[in-house]
Amino acid sequence: MIGFGWLTPRRRSATARSVLAGEASAEAARKSSQELEDQASLVDEHAQDTGEPEFPVAGDDKAAAFFDLDNTVMQGAAIFHFGRGLYKRKFFERRELTRFAWQQAWFRLAGVEDPEHMQDAQNSALSIVKGHRVSELMSIGEEIYDEYLAERIWPGTRALAQAHLDAGQKVWLVTAAPVEIATVIARRLGLTGALGTVAESIGGVYTGRLVGEPLHGPAKAEAVRALASAEGLELGRCAAYSDSHNDIPMLSLVGHPYAINPDTKLRKYARERDWRLRDYRTGRKAAKVGLPAAAGVGAVAGGTAAAIALHRRRR
């Protein structure tokens, strides 16, 4: 009689590798399912939410939006990519590029800004541009944007900035990066302008010194306060966006603070205060629902998907 044992699955003991593979597969399935649920939830909640007033408010000329740059509007640190561009144009030697690379690697691994690292990067940049004309660096900045920065813009954050522009509000970058770099990025994104670290120049030539200090931490809040006063803005009607706990002073200054791609400290701080959060690095909805309605659910969801794909390609 022919046996039909092949119809019955053979039992064998699971090896450690097969257990690991199974667990990994299950976890991947749960993660992908959760991401899909989060995206669907974002659409549903916006569709059902009628109790929250539209934001940003169209035509509110007393409101503006302030966006941090590094890891909020773009992936990584703008000054590192600016350094790459200058190295390509033989502004400095390989050992200095290696230092820039280390600073960028630390930034990406740690996910937070470190004042000492940022100060070192700023000093490096100042020594490199000393003696060069401001107009020359601005022109090179345009080229570097196309070479390194354009593809690193987070689509989701870009959609948020566009929502404010569409509402007729001004949108400013606020960054510790040199103001010349920040201005180029702001202009290429169609934003109003930029607040950044100011390097001293005499007769249009960089001296290698700063005017004041790097625009970091409390200095950002002071810059926003000064600009708001000059522009006749009401900070309680303004919005600010950042990834870093170092920008809590700026975020606390406005009536609509947003934590975007937040570091651990900012995430905790924002949750405690019921601030709105959004993480475009993973596509998950981090905490309180709420993106400006004018950004459009489709634009936000599409931007999130694009950001996820962009991030995965670079991993």
Image (cartoon, rainbow, N blue to C red):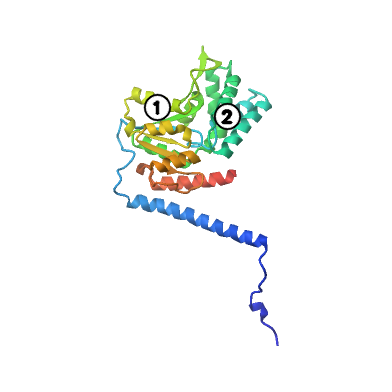
| Label 1 SS | helix
Q: Residue shown at 41%/53% (left/top)? A: 41
- Quadrant housing residue 16: bottom right
Nearest the eye: 90 or 121: 121
Q: Residues within 10 Å of mark 2 (few under 14, many from 20)?
A: some
**Looking at the picture, how far across and down is residue 126, in whole percent?**
57, 20
Q: Residue 102: give its label.
A: none
Res. 276 visible in picture: no
Which residue does the numbered mark 2 point to in the structure image? 117
The three-letter amino acid code for the residue at tag 1 is: Val
Which residue position holds label 1? 224
Q: Quadrant of residue 131?
A: top right
User: How far across and how far down the image is residue 48, in percent?
Assistant: 33, 52
Q: Dot 1, how many residues are within 10 Å of its Cα: few (below 14), some (14-19), or many (20+)?
A: many
In whole angstroms, how far apart are the C-alphas of marks 1 and 2? Answer: 24 Å
x and y, in percent, of residue 47 in the image:
34, 51
Residue 11 visible? The answer is: yes
